[in-house]
Every structure is written in C-alpha cells, then in structure tokens.
Image (cartoon, rainbow, N blue to C red):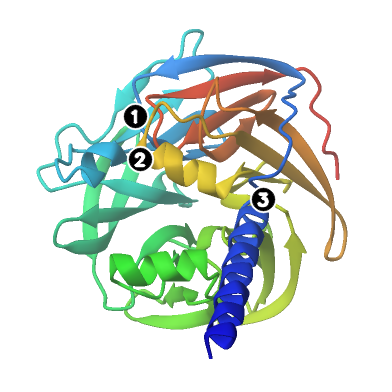
Amino acid sequence: MNRNIKYLVILLLIGAGGFILNTLNDAGEFKTISPHFDGECIPIPGAVGAEDITILKNGTALISSHDRRTALAEIPEQGALYSYNLEDETPKLVNLTADISFEFNPHGISLFENSDGSYRIAVINHTRNGHLIEIFDYRNDSLIHQQSIRDPLLISPNDLVLINATQMYVTNDHGSTSDWGKTLEEYLQLKKANVVFYDGLFFSIASENLGYANGINISLDGKILYVAETVGKKLSMYSRNLVTNKLTFLQSIDMHSGVDNIELDEKGNLWIGSHPKLLTFTRHAKDADVLSPSQVFRLTPKAENDFVIEEIFLSKGDDLSGSSVGAVFGKTLLIGSVFERHFLSCTINQQDGSN
C-alpha cells in the first residue's frame, strides 16, 4: 500500500511538473526576445494606459486612456479619451472627456464615419456598477455623449467594432464573471469567451468558444470579421453576411503570441499589438518594475484567406512594456500599452505592405 501511494505521489508530481512546463511554454516564457524595429521611436507621456488607439483618415488619433493599476488597487481614477493630431507640426494630447460627469474607465474603442463627415464613436466603459458601451458623436475635435448601453450579455467586454452608426460586434474576453472563474479560464485555456452582436436594439451571441476574445475589427469591405484570441494565440476570421450580420467561421491563423487589439491601415493591412510572454505580462500588471516584451505584427492580405505576416516591432519592454495596439498613419506607428504612463510615436523607415 505504501509503495502504491509512493508511485501515486511520483505520478502526481510528474503530472504537475509537466503541466507547469506546458503552461510556461504555451505562454511564451521560453522565447528569446531579439529586439528590432526599422525606424525610430519617441515616448509620448500624458496618456496613462493607452490601451487602444485608432486613427481617423485626417491623421487624428483617438486614444483610450485608463490607469488600470489604480483600478486594481480599488482606488480608480477617471479615465479619458484623448485626441492627438499627427498632422500638427507639434502634436499635443487633448482630453476630449474632461467635462463628462459620469464614471469613465475606457477600454476598447471604435469609430464610424457618417455621411456628413462627423464620426460616431463607441467605447467600452468599465464602472464599479457594471460594464457599459458609451456612444459619442465626434466633430471638430469635441465629443457629445449620446447614449449609454447596458446588457446582461456584456459579461466581460473588451473591444468592439462599429459596422454603422448603430450596430456593432463586441468581444467578451471571459465567460465567467468571478475573478476565480476568469483565472481558471486563462490558465486552463478554457474557451468560454464570445462575440456578441448589437443590432441597435438587442444583443445576441454571434460566435462562441473563443480563447480570450480580445481585439476585433472588420475588413474595409465589411465582409470579413477579425477576432484576436489572446490565450489561444491566434487570429480568427469570419465571413459576415452583409444582410443578416451572421458570422461563418473561415479560419484561424496561429500567431504564436498573445495578440491584442487589431487596427487596419488605409490599404486594409492588419496591425496587431501583442504580448509575446503572457505570464511575464501578468507579472508586469502587478508590478511596474517587471518589464514585459512588446510586439507589433503587420498582416498583409495576398489572396483569399492568405496573409503575409511580418513582425514589425519587438522590444524587451524597456521602451514600452505590455504593448496592446499598433495604429498606423503614413509612416507613423503609434504603439499603446495596457499600463504604461506613455505611448510610443514611431517613424517607420520603410513602409511597404502593398496589396
């Protein structure tokens, strides 16, 4: 009996060791980081936790900013949406939400250009009383709040993409609502995240069984929906019915990295901020002194469901830790992160990615 117990203990230890090694490997902890970028970057202070960035066609970047470390410490500070005009000789951050009176802790953002040249902007807002989507109109570098949307299907919203002024797809990065349940999803790689669709009145589930559904965007022609699965370390693509808005799964591309937000440039290329070492990023979230590598991919469509994948930016995190987004305007690449007190403005020496 004692011998059987001994063998059982050994087997359990071997199993636990194997699980730990597999978890570390899946999280990218054994990767070698060889920094590279063909260009120069400068830090732009003032927007804490610039987790999501999107750029209008006139060169104005909209930046979602929230100090998540104060939120984790349960002493949340008011977040903000900033504009940052890349066409200005000396761009400056402008706080567009300085005067709003409600609690505002923004996450993912999306915009849709109206026929009159104004923009509709949708923003994920995490408050102490639940998750909402805030709807703004944007014109002449000012915001007018129009609506707050709340729904039980907004379990753990992360990002969203407007397909017109009233309808959108939204990612829920977890299926669980408790901290313990979310942790199990991440470490056991449980696929409980989803994408929901808002038709202007009601929400419905559009896609399920995703591994931490994070960034989301749509092709320039509106026919393909892209979803970044961070824990799954892949980019999933869906065909979108332009009449019913139903999604049909097409394929997943293994990115071998914890992909985050997705931006498109004027040519339809995808730019994705990513976390090469997910467990290191988790430690960085708790301790600013722990550096977390930053990474930006460019995916250039070549043929139907075929992409050229390029790693445009990679650093050990000494210039920016925990990159979450890369947004491009001309030869300028803005890289934001989840926690840092600055973002990077980078000039790309060679900008190819032609279709």
Asked if one can make out residue 32 in the rendered structure from this viewpoint, the answer is: yes
Amino acid type, mark 2? Lys
Within 10 angstroms of label 3, few (less than 14), some, or many (20 or more) residues? Answer: many
**Where 115 falls versus 15 (above or below)?**
above
Q: Estimate the x, y position of residue 288 in percent, counting from the top left.
A: 38, 29
Q: Mark 2 or mark 1: which is in front?
A: 2
- In the current view of this chain or complex, which residue is farthest to the front? 2
**Which of the marked residues, 2 or 3, is nearer the chain's N terminus?**
3
**Where 43 falls versus 73 (above or below)?**
above
Q: Estimate the x, y position of residue 147 in percent, counting from the top left.
A: 22, 59
Q: Estimate the x, y position of residue 175 in percent, counting from the top left.
A: 40, 75
Q: Mark 2 or mark 3: which is in front?
A: 2
Whole-angstrom CA distance, mark 1 to mark 3, is 24 Å
**Which of the marked residues, 2 or 1, is nearer the chain's N terminus?**
1
Q: Is residue 175 left or right of residue 137?
A: right
Residue ID for mark 3:
257
Q: Which mark is residue 286?
A: 2
Q: Which residue: 32% across, 23% down?
A: 94
Question: Which is more toward the observer, 349 or 243?
Answer: 349
Image quadrant holding the C terminus, namely top right
Amino acid type, mark 3? Ser
Q: Which residue: 43% across, 36% down?
A: 62
Amino acid type, mark 1? Val
Q: Which mark is residue 48?
A: 1
Q: Secondary structure at mark 1?
A: loop
Whole-angstrom CA distance, mark 2 to mark 1, is 15 Å
Asked if the residue at tag 1 contacts the one at tag 2, i.e. Cβ–Cβ closer than 8 Å, the answer is no
